Image (tube, rainbow, N blue to C red):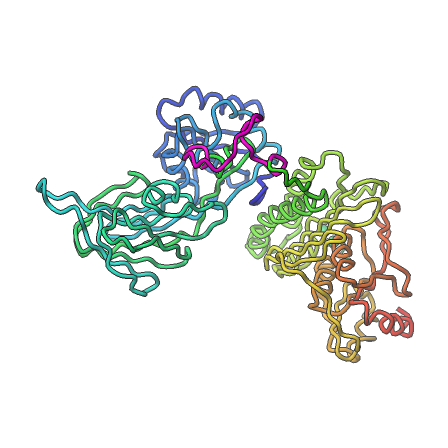
Amino acid sequence: MHGRRLSTLEEVIVLAAPDSDSMVDRVTSWTNTHDISVTTLDVGTSVTDEHVDRTKTTMGVTVGGDGTFLEGARAFAPHQIPLLGINSGTLAFLARVNQTDVEDALSEVFRGRASVNARQQYEVVSDDINTTGINEVFLRKHPPEERYGTKVGSLHVFVDDEYVGQYFGSGLIISTPTGSTGRAYSNHGPVHYPQDNRTLQIVPHETISAAVDPIVVSCDSDIRVVLDDDFDIDIDGGRQFQRLEAGTVVKVTGADQPAQAVRTSYDDPFITALVDKLDWGLRTVDEDGPRSSLTDIGADKPTDFRVRAAQVAKEAAESAGEPLRELHGQVENIEYKTDKSDIVTEADYQANDIIRTAINSEFPNHMVQSEENDDVKPADGYVWLIDPLDGTGNFAHGNPNYSVSIALLEDGVPIVGVVYAPETDEMFHAVAGGGAYLNGNQIETTTRDRLDESMLLSGYDPDGGFLQAFYQETQGVRRLGSAALHLAYVAAGSADAVWEYDTLPWDVAAGLCLLREVGGRATDQHGTEYELLLEADGTTRTPLLASNGLLHDQLIEELETADI
Ligand code: IPD
Ligand code: CA
Ligand code: CA
């Protein structure tokens, strides 16, 4: 699965094409059965704040073909509402759930198994046009008045103020990756895999210069087109269409808000749809049918269960990060200023719920335990240990140092660790035996072995003993306020060691996995290997000294001298 998960569903807004009543009835009867509120609007109606209940997790559903989906993308994107397209038409690349699968696809969303993929949109401004679209802007030479008049027009293209040149032909197409499979493709443009692809492409339409190739630019680029002749502008296949006079400037750039497309296993996969519908003849067909998997082509290498678990944990942490970021942004609001406990409880609850749903739906036989339901269970088998919000004190004060911590334990030993800092978008992960990573790049501890050159971190330090013992002797002692982040930073070499006076298993399980993968050491203050106390009741706290390994013995010596 790619993209973040859509973990809950409480409200559905349907945009329906004409003549799709029976399909709409099926959607509403499904929502009624699942106690989900539903609003149905005709395609073309603007979705406004009145239609959306901000306290609920909402999904948009379009019922129709690709045209309805395009309209839905425009209507829902400003509200950041993810969109599922049900195809009641014939050929569709965007509305990808077929009629037979409607209830199953909706149930998959409800069970937290669907993902949400960001799709780049464009923004087009010219004369009185100021709109967004998801497919393409097509500028086509306005047809000549006389039958034999020229159909060739001229226009000039600039990218980020650099002059590309003068194009002669019947027009120009500027498309997003999603729009790459339509008009742009028919004019020899490349096909883009649309998921999380943030680009725009410029494809000449029936150019008379054989040497002009399509150009792919960043979605942040400003594309300016200056028309030498009268052209018609066609936005997303006719959604908006009008004549522009010679001399008009058309500006196109990537829109800030992506469209959020919901993907379920009932969608036609993108490349399969392409290969089949365009009959590329790329896939060998033998007596068992077309070959489409690694097994089929004899290159099967099953994905390690741990790698899959790490992927699920990362997706869950990222999804939990969204409500956390949103609520964190509200803590200083008047409403919460005096009593912050409500907002923190809400943040804990929402993040916990999202992570649990994601893990339960992928690994229904695993035990999931978190700070929010701290009934510590036996340590055998697979147990997930979660702190949905580590650093609640920081969170409550609008400080960015808080994190999501998720670990998978096998017989009490962390084999997967994920620590995610939503405000800085730092995703740390490790799989036992596979190294540790920050945003996909391998991390390592420092190689410092002198205390006077080191920088330390400290957690709760009740009488300031740790600070007193090390502040003068080192380059400093910092206290960030999230035990999970402390360990991640030591594993990534942003600090040399950390001392936590008391820890609970969910504070440190993920961080320990990271640390062990980079060869760090974790003990108590006397050098005894640190153990996660799972079988004890959840209130038993244990001290933890974690370091790059090289400084460890010196740190213990000092701790013992200072009697900490
Ligand atoms: C706390 C933080 C803090 C540490 C405490 C933890 P919470 O977790 O990690 O840095 O010193 O021991 O309980 O309550 O914010 O999840
Ligand atoms: Ca914690
Ligand atoms: Ca917590």
Q: Quadrant of residue 148?
A: top left
Residue 368 locus on image (x, y percent): 75, 40
What is the x, y in percent for residue 124? 32, 51
Q: Is residue 190 left or right of residue 28?
A: left
Looking at the picture, tell me which residue is in the foreground, 272 or 339.
272
* Residue 280 falls in image quadrant: top left
Q: Is 145 drawn above or below residue 208 in the view shown?
A: above
- Which of the image's four quarters has the C terminus? bottom right
Q: Residue at 32% x, 65% y: name it.
A: 162
* Residue 107 lies in quadrant: top right
User: Majority secondary structure of the magenta segment?
Assistant: loop
478 lies left or right of 176 = right
From the viewer's perspective, tell me whether residue 225 is left or right of residue 267.
Answer: left
Along the line of sight, the residue nearer the viewer: 467 or 355: 355
In front: 71, or 136?
A: 136
Q: Which residue corresponds to the image point at 85% horizontal and 60% vertical from the top-left?
A: 543
Residue drawn at (37%, 28%), measured in percent from left and top?
Answer: 17
| Extent of the magenta region | 275-296
